[in-house]
Amino acid sequence: MIWNETKECMSRDQMTAIQSARLVKLVDYVYHNVEFYRKKMQAIDLMPGDIKGLDDITKLPFTTKDDLRDNYPFGLFAVPNSEIVRIHASSGTTGKATVVGYTRYDLDVWSECVARCLTMAGVSKDDIIQVAYGYGLFTGGLGAHGGAEKIGATVVPMSTGNSKKLTTMMVDFGATAIACTPSYLLHISEVLENEGLIDQIKLKSAICGAEPWTEKMRNEIEKRLKIKAYDIYGLSEVMGPGVACDCDFHKGLHVCEDHFYPEVLDTATLSPVKDGETGELAFTTLTKEGIPLIRYRTKDLTSIDHSPCECGRTSARISRFKGRVDDMLIIRGVNVFPSQVEAALVNVEEVTPHYMMIVDRVNNLDTLELQVEIDQKFYTDEVKAIEALTKKIAHILQQALGINAKVKIVEPQSLVRSEGKAVHVIDKRKYD
């Protein structure tokens, strides 16, 4: 382990040795078990024996989200389906999900990594933790759940959607920790305040992730609930929550780098950058069996620090994310692409391809409004007709995006046209 509760850590040289040995095994594993990687390596005359350690990782090809979509659903799996014990998936830009499979060993590693993160947040077997991430194909709920059980905590699988019930049980059960999105936790704090229950809770810590958030939001959460809030990071393609988490010093997220080797790449050249320099984060999954990934480009912009942390841990730390290199939005923990909206609107003959997505944060919860231009030949002042069209589009979007959006029908030619790249998104949220 990189760390444990007594903060006994391995040196950087020890970690590098472990990573190098695991990388060598990984390359041989994917070459012989994943046709996609075998063809990629053969295309550049690269054989498993050419990779002798971390110094050779830049010889390996990158993997992207498009590769997962192109091999939908199970084309990148390295084991037969009989060895896959669970499947998760995230939405894609054109309706195709990115599908990931887990072996029993993968689930054990996942639980171990989340357990490390919860330990950093002060959670132990003596705690009662409410998991208020969504359960299902989304990795948040079951990921946090498995890690909490790993350390022996009492888990309350709340999921999302019933804030009043959550706050009631928080008080009645004496919950001491919660795992959820930071925006939802701020909403929960308002519910507690409105119900006069703030002084009755026993909450000590929160493990928040699945969306960008600021130090200001962290401070607001800690002030309102009188707790400590921690940032957890993950993505379904690599594993799920538990890839990294911050400690009490909040000076970067500690990566579980014995399982996930991080690189930060220059966005122009894709060459690794120095510590402290901003670039695109990529991960190589050193121990995954089900769907191992080599140099997976996350699109997240960050920097990395390999120096020891004040907490005593020696694991590499990635900084708070500075943005993305694509147009993906994270709304209430769900990945949303403008191209998903475009694909959905194509099937609605009453509207034009012109639209505007307006993302905001109201009462600490993300909101999405979609302004859609009605086609001139369908233009009408009839209220019932507009209401019916609005309801129709809202239903189509909910099916396509997985979240509810407020739809507003606007007059023909009313949305601004662009002479260059069309602007389809106005994000009013602030993450500075």
Image: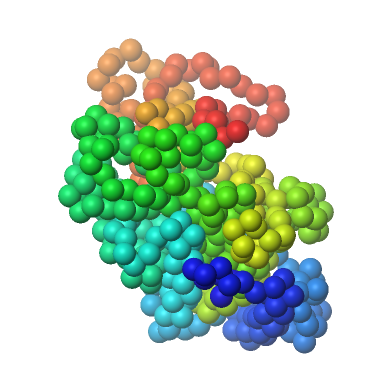
Q: Relative to the observer, which residue lies in front, 238 or 196?
A: 196
Quadrant where the C terminus is found in the figure = top right
Q: Quadrant of residue 21?
A: bottom right
> Which residue is rendered at x = 61% and y = 29% of the image?
423
> Which residue is rendered at x = 38% and y = 77% of the image?
85
Instruction: Tell me: residue 288, above or below residue 214.
Output: below
Q: Quadrant of residue 141?
A: bottom left
Whether residue 57 appears in this view of the structure is: yes
Name the image colouring.
Answer: rainbow
Q: Quadrant of residue 221?
A: top left
Residue 138 % position (x, y): 40, 57
State left or right for residue 159 relative to residue 34.
Answer: left
Residue 277 % position (x, y): 77, 49
Whether residue 352 appears in this view of the structure is: no
Residue 92 % position (x, y): 50, 53
Instruction: Tell me: residue 421, above or below residue 170.
Output: above
> Which residue is rendered at x = 80% and y = 55% of the image?
274
